[in-house]
Image (cartoon, coloured by chain):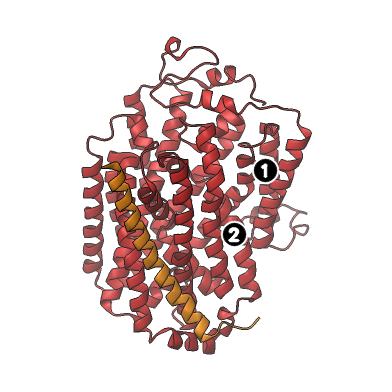
Amino acid sequence: MSALGPTAFGLLVWGSIALVLASFAYLTYQLAVDAQNSA
Amino acid sequence: MVTSALALGITAATLAAVTALGLLYSRGRVDTVEDYVSARNSIGTGASTATLVASSMGAWILLSPAEAGAAFGGLPAVLGYTIGSAIPLLLLVPVGVRIRRLMPEGHSLTEYALVRFGSRMYAYVLVVSLLYMFVFLAAEMTGIAGALAMLADVPRWQTAALIGGFVLVYTAYGGLVATIVTDTVQTLVILPLLAVGFAGALFALGGTGEVHAEIASANAYLLDPGYAAGVEFGIYVVFAVLGAGMLNQGRWQRVYAAKNDATLRRSLVAAAAMSVPLILLSGLFGVAAAGLGFVDGNASVAFFALVNGAFPEWVALVVVVLAVLLVASSADTMFNAIASLVTADLARLVDADAAALSRTGRALTVAVAAGAIVIGSQGYSVLSLFLTADLLAAATFVPFIAGLYSTRLTETGALASSLAGLALGVVFFPTLRGALAAIPGLGDALPAPSFMHAFVGATAVSALLTLVAARVADADFDHAGLAREIREIEQPMTDGGIDADDDATTGATAADADAAAPEVDR
């Protein structure tokens, strides 16, 4: 199998960083929904 | 280089803030042993997801995947680690719901082992689970102590004592309540810090193109998804992490903490999805560290070697805060999980009052913390520590979980399946087979050492024998008996059909449990 090219490597790294930020956004939203439901 | 005083100051300030939060929030909320070890049906999807992420993602995500990427096989090793870490969370979706339904008032995986299988399987699962969690803790302490020693020349014992001491304060005081609230805040801080830290690191290294070119010119095989050694690691780490994930008491506590089954399902899937980019990123930076030539000897701290060698001081400080939060978020889970295991079991096995159980739980938390601090300051290989405990779990989790579904699997069948898997694993396990090899005549007969054969073999043999054992036995275990036997700690345990009010003791004895479960096959 051939080694990962620079474009795929960049997508993997930056895509992961974007997913980490998306996780943060989801968690914040979900905590807000929980707080609203329990209020 | 960051100075030792600055690193210790940042560490202490971060821990002080977390400790204050844990103490303030849990004040007045922990009145009973039940409060201390269980937060039953109390948290929504957000907090449940956050605490699953925080308790799973210790500082090991900056250590083990990076070590895997740097020393165990590059990209495929990292991909294996990533998949392996997400699978146990996904597997816990059906299993967790099953646990909640069969034992709605349960606390620990060992009380399940005792009631479902019997005292021998209980003792075995207790040892495996405690060992795994203690190794997890010790590995966390080892990792952070090594990282701060590299980044700022902080003596290992100082880092381990500082982190262990602070986490101990709020965990011993506030139990699971404090752990969950600090986990939630820690996750909210950890996620953006990770993103900013990794992005800042990339810019400091000249972007992904530059990093890729350096790796490709130095060690191109690290970027090859088909690199054989990495693929092999990627396969066996799935089995290693899977077993350990299923025997993690911290996860069992969180199964019960979720408000309802739907909340549990959503939060487990979300936590699994979130773990993927976190571990992938960390592993890729391990690959980068190896490719850029920053790994010199100890690959455990490959990521920190990269931070130390190539990044400005502010990135190093962000990484210190991040690592400290990661350690605290998983260490508090393990402290409370170990205390809860023993506390829940004591309530069942001895006739102790609630105050004595609370004292015991807190004393155990202190003892566990002290042990982890001592081991953590010794500087062992983090991944080697994990792999040893993982082998025990890999050989145990299939028969253990099968008991939730099979009515025919007996204690003898489950135990024999697990021990046979373990024996096969030890024969192949590179660091454990030394004792066997020393036996005259046996050394030459042993097969070549292989982690792959050890983990896959241990899991496969235990699974196969579990299937056989469940087929050949004529037992008929009544799963409804689990709910009758496993009750909230404050409630008197029922003794078979005897009304709870007639048996007003805090905990039933083991003999009571045996007498009360005639349908339990031994």
* Residue B41 picture location, percent across and down: 39, 37
Question: What tint does the image give chain B?
Answer: red
Judging from the image, what secondary structure is the residue with disc 1 in?
Answer: helix
Q: Is residue B55 above or below residue B340?
A: below
Q: State the residue at coordinates (55%, 16%).
A: B496
Let me know if residue B172 appears in the view.
Answer: no
What is the x, y in percent for residue B492?
A: 43, 19
Q: Is residue B405 left or right of residue B282?
A: right
- Left or right: where does residue B283 sit relative to residue B394? left
Task: Name the residue that disc number 1 marks.
Answer: B419
Quick one: which residue is furthest to the top in this view? B502
Q: Chain of mark 1?
A: B
The hue used for chain A is: orange
Q: Residues within 10 Å of mark 1 (few under 14, many from 20)?
A: some
Q: What residue is shown at x 69% (from left), y 46% (from top)?
A: B462
Q: Which residue is mark 2?
A: B238
Identify the mark nearer the N-term, 2 or 1: 2
* Residue B98 sits in quarter: top right
Q: Work out whether residue B242 can be spotted.
A: yes
